[in-house]
């Protein structure tokens, strides 16, 4: 079959698909919870916050997977903690705090990469090299995916409660809202680091947020939304890689663009609030 032929014949296509599927399984549930907590733009902010740490790792060790990953994780967690502290101890809201830090981080990261590297190196950091994913990258992404799913299973109930009723969670003795929020932000950062290795700092948040937003139109229940988000992310990965192979498109942006196409299809035809679904319901009600 023409759609699976590239993955049968070429190892780099198989590795790219495995990395995207692992990322889809772990990152998109986090995107759903970001939407529930009205923090969708925080994911974008943190994806940019990863850049200066990755750039410092690049300056020290070149295009080293380990150095850039560790640097990106440290930078992302630092920005998350600083933004939380600023919003806690000043009148500035958390979204505005994240915006200020991520804009500065993006400018600093681009500047650091440009000090030593070429425009090719800068594009690699910003947009990733999905078709150049190697075994260590797959191991890293798969490990982060497994850890994320395990931790999500452990904090699932308090995370859901915190999204809808933080006061009730505060009444429980075992979990506190700041603890759950902190663990959740750590998961978001490490998944953005994993996505950065595959899709680059500017594209990694796309596979986290677009399927999550699309899933809202396919289920009214949280469990169904999580499952739909993961399925849509996997479909986006497969279709984007196929489009990249047959149309000679850059692989990372093609995957995110496929997710964007599914997002617009969901807006139009999704059974749970899609435009045509609502119009059909209204017309049937009038009859």
Image: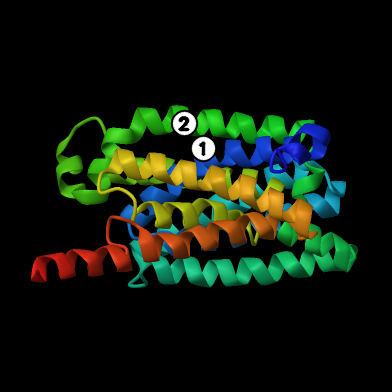
Specify the quadrant of the image occupied by residue 110. Answer: bottom right
Residue 187 appearing in the image: no
Q: Nearer the viewer, mark 2 or mark 1?
A: 1
Q: Residue at x 79, y 63 (%)?
A: 123
The reply to whether discs 2 and 1 touch (Cβ–Cβ < 8 Å) is: yes
The one nearer the camera, 101 or 24, is 24
Q: Earlier in the sequence, mark 2 or mark 1?
A: 1
Residue corresponding to mark 2: 149
Residue that extends furthest to the front in the rendered view of this protein: 287
Colour convention: rainbow
| Place of residue 106 in the rendered image (x, y in percent of width and height, measured from the top left) | 65, 68
CA distance for labels 2 and 1:
8 Å
Crowding around mark 1 (Cα neighbors within 10 Å: few <14, some 14 to 19, many 20+) is: many
Q: Left or right: where does residue 23 sit relative to residue 138?
A: left
| Place of residue 271 in the rendered image (x, y in percent of width and height, measured from the top left) | 30, 55
| Image quadrant containing the C terminus | bottom left
Q: Residue at x 77, y 59 (%)?
A: 247
The one nearer the camera, 283 or 30, is 283
Numbered label attached to residue 49:
none
Residue corresponding to mark 1: 25
The one nearer the camera, 112 or 32, is 32
Residue 91 appearing in the image: yes
Q: Residue 162, relative to residue 118: is it above or below? A: above
Q: Left or right: where does residue 18 sit relative to residue 265?
A: right
Q: Residue at x 39, y 51 (%)?
A: 215
Q: Residue at x 68, y 39 (%)?
A: 17
Crowding around mark 2 (Cα neighbors within 10 Å: few <14, some 14 to 19, many 20+) is: some
* Mark 1: secondary structure: helix
* Mark 2: secondary structure: helix
């Amino acid at each position: 079959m023409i759609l699976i032929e590239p993955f049968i014949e070429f190892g780099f296509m198989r590795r790219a698909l495995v990395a995207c599927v692992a990322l889809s399984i772990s990152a998109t549930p986090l995107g759903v919870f970001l939407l529930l907590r009205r923090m969708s733009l925080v994911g974008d902010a943190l994806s940019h916050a990863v850049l200066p740490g990755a750039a410092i790792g690049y300056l020290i060790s070149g295009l080293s997977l380990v150095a850039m990953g560790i640097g990106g994780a440290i930078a992302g967690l630092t920005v998350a903690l600083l933004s939380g502290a600023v919003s806690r101890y000043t009148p500035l809201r958390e979204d505005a705090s994240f915006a200020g830090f991520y804009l500065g981080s993006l400018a600093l990261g681009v500047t650091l990469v440009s000090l030593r590297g070429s425009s090719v190196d800068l594009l690699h950091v910003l947009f990733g090299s999905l078709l150049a994913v190697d075994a260590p990258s797959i191991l890293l992404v798969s490990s982060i995916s497994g850890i994320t799913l395990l931790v999500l299973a452990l904090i699932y109930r308090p995370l859901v409660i915190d999204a809808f009723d933080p006061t009730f969670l505060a009444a429980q003795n075992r979990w506190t809202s700041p603890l759950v929020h902190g663990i959740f932000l750590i998961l978001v950062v490490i998944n953005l680091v994993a996505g950065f290795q595959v899709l680059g700092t500017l594209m990694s948040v796309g596979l986290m947020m677009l399927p999550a937003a699309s899933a809202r139109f396919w289920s009214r229940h949280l469990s169904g939304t999580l499952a739909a988000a993961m399925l849509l992310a996997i479909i986006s990965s497969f279709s984007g890689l196929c489009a990249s192979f047959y149309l000679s498109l850059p692989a990372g942006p093609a995957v995110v663009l496929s997710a964007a196409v599914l997002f617009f299809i969901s807006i139009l035809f999704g059974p749970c609030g899609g435009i045509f679904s609502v119009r059909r319901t209204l017309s049937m009600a009038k009859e």
